[in-house]
Structure formats: C-alpha cells, structure tokens
C-alpha cells in the first residue's frame, strides 16, 4: 500500500509540474507587462513545485499515519488529530509563502467549520486575518503614480507610508487630501492581477489532480467560486459601486435601520480599479469588546444590529456582503447621538470591503427566507420543503439544516424555546463535527448540489456566527428571533406582491399582526429563560 501511495504522490508531482508550464505560458501570453511576464516565468514554477510538494505531503501523511488503525479507536482519533495539526500547519505555511489568493483561500477554509476539521479552522482563523503580507512603500509609490499620475506626496497633502491594515489583495494607508479631509487609501498589492491569474491556474491544477487520485477530496466548487469572484475583487471600482448600491438598498428597502448602517464615502476622483480612496472612519473593530464598551455601547446591541443588517440584506435586498469577518465590520456610536430608552448609546455598523457581493434571484431569496423562517419555528415540513427547493434533495435536507444552524437535526426540530440558538453549544458542534467526519462524502455531495450563491450564504453565516461569538458569552437568542422576524416579513411581502388586491392586503396585515404577536410571546419566553439561567448562576456562586 505504501508503494502505491508513493506512486500516486510521484504522479501528482510530475503531472502538476509538467502541466504547470502551460499555466505559466498562458499567464505570460496574456500579460500587458513583458517584464513582469518574464518574472512570472520563474515565480510560477517555484510556486507550483511548492504547491505540489505540500499537497502530496499532506495526502501521504493522512494515508500513512492512519493506515491500519481501526475506525473508532483511541489510537486512530489521536493520530487523526496529530495529522490534522500537521496538515493545517503545512497549509498555513504554503498560504503565507505564496500570498495573494492563497491567503484568500485560507480565510475561506477557516470559515468552513461544518466541513473542514476543527484543527484547520482554528489555525486558519488565528492567522489568516492577522498576518497578511505588506507591500513596500516603493511598491505603493509605484501604484499611486501609475494610477493617479503623481507620487503620493503630490496627490495628497499627507500620506502615511506605514499601512494601518493589510489584507490578501491590498493594504490601507491613512492620508489627507489637499482640502484637509482625512481619508483611507486602499492600494492593491503590485502586479496582483497577473499573479492572481497564475495562482488561480496552479491552485485549480492541484485541486483537480488531488481529486483524481483521492476522490473524497473534492473542493472543485471552491475553485469555481474563486474563478468568478477574484476578478471582481481585484477591480476596486466594482467595490466602490457595490458600497453605493448597498446603502441605496437600505434607504429604499430597509429605511427603519438605514441610519444604523453606514459605508464610507468614496472619493471617485482619487479612485481607480487598483486604488480606492475612501472616507476615514474613527471606529472600533466589531470584535474589540473593550473598545466597544469604552464607547458606551452594549455588545448585545451590536449583535442585534449585525444580525438585523445581514438578515435585511439576505431576505429583503437579495444583495449580500459575503465577507463580513471582524476586520470588515466597525462600530461607532450613532452620529445623531440618539440613545435607547435606558439611556444607552446606540451603535452604528460600518461596512468595509465591498468587493465580494452576491445577488440572490427572487426565487432563491424567498426560498432561503422561507427556510430560515421554518428553522426558527422548528417547522420540520417547511425545512424539508425549502431545503429541497434550494437543491439539497430529499436525502440531505437534515444535513443542510444542521450546517446552517450548527446543530444536530434533533435540536433543529426541537419545539422548546431552547432551540432558538444560532450558535450551538460546544457539545452540539462536537456532535456535528463527528457527524461531518462520518458522512464526509454526503457533505461534499451536498456542496456539489447547492447553488454557489447558497455556498456563499453559508460562508456569510459562518462569519457572522464568529463575529457574534466574539461579542457575547453563549448563544444569541435574540439574533435568532431577529432572523425569524425579517425572514417571515420577506415571505409575507412576496405573497402580497403576487396577489395585489384588497383581500390580499388585509390578509397581509392580519398575518403581520399574528407574526408580531408570536414573536412577542417568544421574546417573553426568551427573557424568562435568561432570567432563570441568571438565577441558577447566582445560586451556584
């Protein structure tokens, strides 16, 4: 067996290296920069060799380390944990050494806790958002001059050469315009477009080759998504237009919270496809609990605002920010100074990085809203019906519901008030991880069936779950109620649009009143549950 594994490894290395020359040649042929194209001639083979060695090493490590260990044994569990850790570290090192879209892929894998082993999730989440590469000031100088026709000190009155943030595709510098406005300048890493094209070709080659030799390893859907999304993310004018459209949607479709959501103003005369100048925001990062509290804002209010903002996007706008990790969400006190009835400062959520958006067509949006409505109300028939409509099929709907809520099926359909939890307990997640490990082929089949836009919604849910988890201890019951209300309203509004008549209008308002009454009862039950838990904790102390 070891011999066959080594032969597979050798084929993987030889095949990817040989075919990689084609990827490099294609990139060079399509490049507008001959000098950079020549440079890529050396970079691409090096990265491809690095990819091949890493992929083959990880694959062989799994096969060799688990060989002969019986399923369910303590020895296999221990060995699997150790090989997961080694694989995650190797993949982390590969992402940072190659940079660019590799880091983007690493960030994405860090959100797939329903599919990727916990060791990979933890390592990727810890490192991928905090250790992104930096471009030198000379490189930034080159981009600014090429895009705006002058060096930074000419275009801006002040320009800080040290970036305040860096991501996989770009970094941000603080500057001041000649009329005194403080701005944030997002500068794309040099030659990112050429490198991304080559990186995409090599990553696709590796994933397809791995799938050929190890059929259970099937991440081709992720590569397809990257192929579509990366060119859009590399065009900062697309990002700027997305931010404008996002705020227009809130003003037109969600006016009740439009004051509580904000996107920085774009300076169009100082922006191009590779450089974006925006209003500078003085605000706390959404997972910075201490800073949020120093601003006089309750973390629970931020959780509710984040939940409502993205519920409105998903269920009513159909135009969704699909990268809401902590670095892309800021919080500040509401500029109007308005306070709650208890005198607490109200938060305003600031949305950054609008490069990755997805549009849900009408049927997908309503079916997705109806599914979440059914999940909130533990409606097993409604869950199955809408899972099937979204592509999960009659056989995998329970798995799909579990992935959305991070809870096992028996908890998903539990009618008690305790089921109202977006973030399951550690025990629930452990059970789901074990289920995921046992039924890995079914999960990959589910991901193959689901439309890519729904896969992006899963990623968005995972990001929001992580953000909310960093703000409050334990599950957010009210967040689930907010999702229930907004999804129910979207379904009701869709019925009204289909039948425009006086009777339909009356029925709409009757159903809306009944919905509010049902949610009110559930709120009271949640408050009682929280009070009961607080008393229990008090007695224990």
Image (cartoon, rainbow, N blue to C red):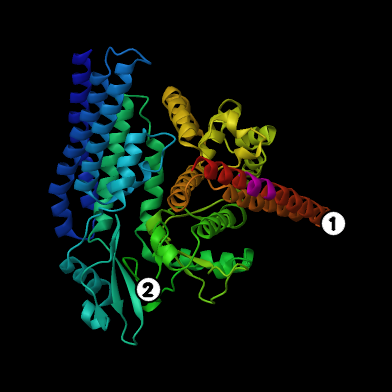
Observer-nearest of 362 and 15: 362
Tell me if 217 is positioned left or right of 314 in this view: left
Whether residue 222 is visible, yes or no, is yes
Judge depth for marks 2 and 1 and give the one in front.
Answer: 2
- Magenta: main secondary structure: helix
The stretch drawn in magenta includes residue 64: no
- Residues rendered magenta in the picture: 524-529
Q: Position of residue 99 (x, y in %)?
A: 23, 50
Tell me if 101 is positioned left or right of 17 in this view: right
Observer-nearest of 193 and 496: 496
Observer-nearest of 321 and 150: 321
Q: Position of residue 511 (x, y in %)?
A: 79, 51
Observer-nearest of 43 and 513: 513
Whether residue 18 is visible, yes or no, is no
The mark found on residue 506 in the picture is 1
Identify the residue at image location x=36%, y=52%: 230
Q: Quadrant of the N terminus?
A: top left
Position above or below: 433 against 290: above
Tell me if 383 is positioned left or right of 507 in this view: left
Regarding mark 1 in the picture, which secondary structure is present there?
helix
Identify the residue at image location x=62%, y=64%: 254
- Sequence-wise first label, 2 or 1: 2
User: How many numbered marks appear?
Assistant: 2
Q: Which residue is mark 2?
A: 280
Position above or below: 32 against 17: below
């Amino acid at each position: 067996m070891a011999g066959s594994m080594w032969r597979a490894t050798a084929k993987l290395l030889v095949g990817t290296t040989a075919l990689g020359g084609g990827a490099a040649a294609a990139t060079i042929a399509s490049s507008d920069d001959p000098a950079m194209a020549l440079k890529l001639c050396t970079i691409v083979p090096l990265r491809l060799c690095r990819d091949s060695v890493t992929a083959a090493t990880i694959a062989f490590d799994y096969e060799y380390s688990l060989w002969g260990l019986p399923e369910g044994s303590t020895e296999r569990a221990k060995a699997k944990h150790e090989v997961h850790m080694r694989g995650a570290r190797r993949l982390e090192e590969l992402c940072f050494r190659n940079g660019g879209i590799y880091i983007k892929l690493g960030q994405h894998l860090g959100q797939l806790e329903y599919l990727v082993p916990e060791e990979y999730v933890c390592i990727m989440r810890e490192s991928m958002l905090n250790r992104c590469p930096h471009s030198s000031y000379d490189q930034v100088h080159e981009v600014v001059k090429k895009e705006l026709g002058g060096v930074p000190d000419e275009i801006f009155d002040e320009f800080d050469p040290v970036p305040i943030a860096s991501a996989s595709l770009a970094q941000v510098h603080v500057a001041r315009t000649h009329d005194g406005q403080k701005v944030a300048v997002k500068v794309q890493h040099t030659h990112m477009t050429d490198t991304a094209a080559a990186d995409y070709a090599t990553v696709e080659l590796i994933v397809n080759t791995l799938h050929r030799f190890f059929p259970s390893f099937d991440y081709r859907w992720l590569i397809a998504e990257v192929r579509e999304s990366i060119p859009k993310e590399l065009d900062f004018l697309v990002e700027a237009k997305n931010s404008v459209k996002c705020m227009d949607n809130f003003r037109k479709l969600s006016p009740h919270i439009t004051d509580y959501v904000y996107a920085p103003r774009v300076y169009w005369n100082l922006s191009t496809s590779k450089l974006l100048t925006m209003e500078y925001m003085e605000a706390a990062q959404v997972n910075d609990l201490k800073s949020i509290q120093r601003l006089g804002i309750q973390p629970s209010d931020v959780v509710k605002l984040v939940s409502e903002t993205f519920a409105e996007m998903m269920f009513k706008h159909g135009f969704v920010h699909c990268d809401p990790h902590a670095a892309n969400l800021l919080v500040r006190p509401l500029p109007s100074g308005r306070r709650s009835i208890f005198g607490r400062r109200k938060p305003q959520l600031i949305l950054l990085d609008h490069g990755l958006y997805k549009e849900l067509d009408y049927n997908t949006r309503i079916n997705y809203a109806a599914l979440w409505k059914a999940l909130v109300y533990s409606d097993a028939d409604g869950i199955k019906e809408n899972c099937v409509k979204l592509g999960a099929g009659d056989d995998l709907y329970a798995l799909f519901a579990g992935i959305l809520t991070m809870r096992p099926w028996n908890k998903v359909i539990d009618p008690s008030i305790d089921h109202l939890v977006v973030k399951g307990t550690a025990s629930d997640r452990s059970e789901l991880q074990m289920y995921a490990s046992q039924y890995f082929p079914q999960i990959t089949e589910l991901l193959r069936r689901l439309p890519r836009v729904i896969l992006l919604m899963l990623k968005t849910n995972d990001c929001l779950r992580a953000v909310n988890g960093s703000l409050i201890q334990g599950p957010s019951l009210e967040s689930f109620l907010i999702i229930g209300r907004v999804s129910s309203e979207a379904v009701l509004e869709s019925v009204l649009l289909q039948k425009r008549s006086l009777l339909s209008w009356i029925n709409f308002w009757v159903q809306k009143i009944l919905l509010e009454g049902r949610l009110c009862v559930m709120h009271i039950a949640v408050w009682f549950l929280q009070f009961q838990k607080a008393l229990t904790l008090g007695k224990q102390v």
